[in-house]
Amino acid sequence: MPIHSPGKARTSQRTTTATEVRAGATTFMVMAYIIFVNPLILGFGGVPGLEGKGLPFAPTLTVTCLSAGLLSIAMGVFAKYPLALAPGMGLNAVVAFELVAGRGLTWPQAMTVVLCEGLAITILVLTRFREAMMTAVPIGLKRAIGMGIGLFIAFIGFFTSGFVVKPAAGPLPVGLGTLTGLPIVVFLVGFVLTAVLLARRVRGALLIGIVVTTVVAIVLNGVLAGWKGFATPGAAQLPHALVQAPDFSTFGRIDFGFFTRLGTVTALLAIFSVMLSDFFDTMGTIIAVGEQGGFLGSDGRLPRANRVLLVDSLGAVFGGLANASSATTYIESAAGVAEGARTGLAAVVVGVLFLLSMFFAPLASVIPAQATAPVLILVGLLMMSIAREIAWDDYAEAIPAFVTMLVMPFTWSITNGIGAGFVTYSAIKLLGGRGGQVHFMVYVASAAFLVYFALPLIEAPAK
């Protein structure tokens, strides 16, 4: 059935129910890793010295699926965009390794920090400050944020596939992985297959690539490796069971005692640090996916942006309350947009699949990272198409754009890239005699980012 995309700014395309469902399934499969990665991170899985100090796996898996499911559905119904949410990668590591392992907070206290930053961002949304900040970002910097995120998710794809690795020794930060072994073979097969399907413009190329690559991985793992070819539990294996009862035992455990434990100043700085990362990660994701889907107007504005931002801010509140870490809008939504998603129906499909995963978790664990990595890389390629719209001959525009694009993948952080871009843009414009061209909100954001980058120095005396 043909349906219209509501509020589209730069495209009058129609979509269909089948397209939205297929695109939603694609987004879910690209995001499905979070079902298991989030419990592993919050459980300190495989981290020497921290075994047994993390959150238990089963209830964390349940609240991860619950958060992703309910919030993705809320985004689809309330904001009507194909944007999916789940507990954020990066933010979960901050909670686990900075707040709990580093600062000695209990898990309920750390999750209450997330709850507080979510409430703070919600206030900024309700006062329309967050939307005003999005609107104030210059169009060139918005384009650069989108491309930077494209490079970032492509790098994530290469890294999770094992094609790019962190060397165990030596001065280089990254290197070429060992091009032998079953996982890398599966990745290469998946990449070639998905790339060919995409080049031939086969409808559903990304979803077909994930499914076929997963089947290939299962067959090869069973025939050639005796079911021991993949390190991730359950990956590329026949599931041991199809149904598993959800465990809600950690839901609702919060504790405001972190103010006493850290001291008021350090506690507020901890909230500010997490809030700033959450605030601008989402902004970058919305801009990037909005650009790719044609949702942004010629002025770079997103219709109904405040609805998107409200759902996202409540994601942090709910994620903290659920003990799942802050739920945020996922850049992997771009995979669904690349498959044709243009309405909130795709996000609803993602949400339903996450809720079902609470019961069918063993089945979802079958998909190996090497099956979804090719999709991340190729979606990164698709997001680079806006490079031609950057004013590369104007160095006051080109340099901040270049810095933004590179800092994201090089520091493994969307927030760092946006911050470096803001500060560079403001400094070059101001010192170059063109400071009047910069919106005062950009100066405010730049000042906030200077504080963000200086946090280690600010916090040192407070510890």
Image (spheres, grey):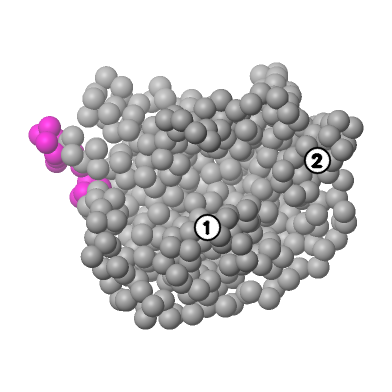
Which numbered dot is residue 69? Answer: none
Q: Is residue 358 left or right of residue 334?
A: right
Disc 1 from disc 2: Cα separation:
28 Å
Residue 446 is situated, as x and y percent measured from the top left of the image, at 25, 48
| Residue name at image x 45 percent, y 70 percent | 104
Magenta stretch contains residue 440: yes
Q: Work out whether residue 289 or residue 248 is closer to the camera in this orientation and state it.
A: 248
Indicate the quadrant containing the C terminus: top left, top right, bottom left or bottom right: bottom left
Identity, as a three-letter code, of the amino acid under mark 1: Asn
Inspect this view and state whether residue 100 appears.
yes
* The image quarter in which residue 413 lies: top left
Q: Is residue 211 left or right of residue 66?
A: right
Q: Which one is closest to the eye, mark 1 or mark 2? A: 2
The tally of labels here is 2
Q: Residues within 10 Å of mark 1 (few under 14, many from 20)?
A: many
Residue hosting label 1: 92
Residue 213 is situated, as x and y percent measured from the top left of the image, at 77, 32
| Residue name at image x 30 percent, y 47 percent | 136
Q: Secondary structure at mark 2?
A: loop
Magenta span: predominant SS is: helix
Q: Which residues are magenta?
A: 430-443
Q: Secondary structure at mark 1?
A: helix
Q: Earlier in the sequence, mark 1 or mark 2?
A: 1
Residue 77 is situated, as x and y percent measured from the top left of the image, at 61, 59
Residue hosting label 2: 228
Identity, as a three-letter code, of the amino acid under mark 2: Lys
| Residue name at image x 27 percent, y 19 percent | 393
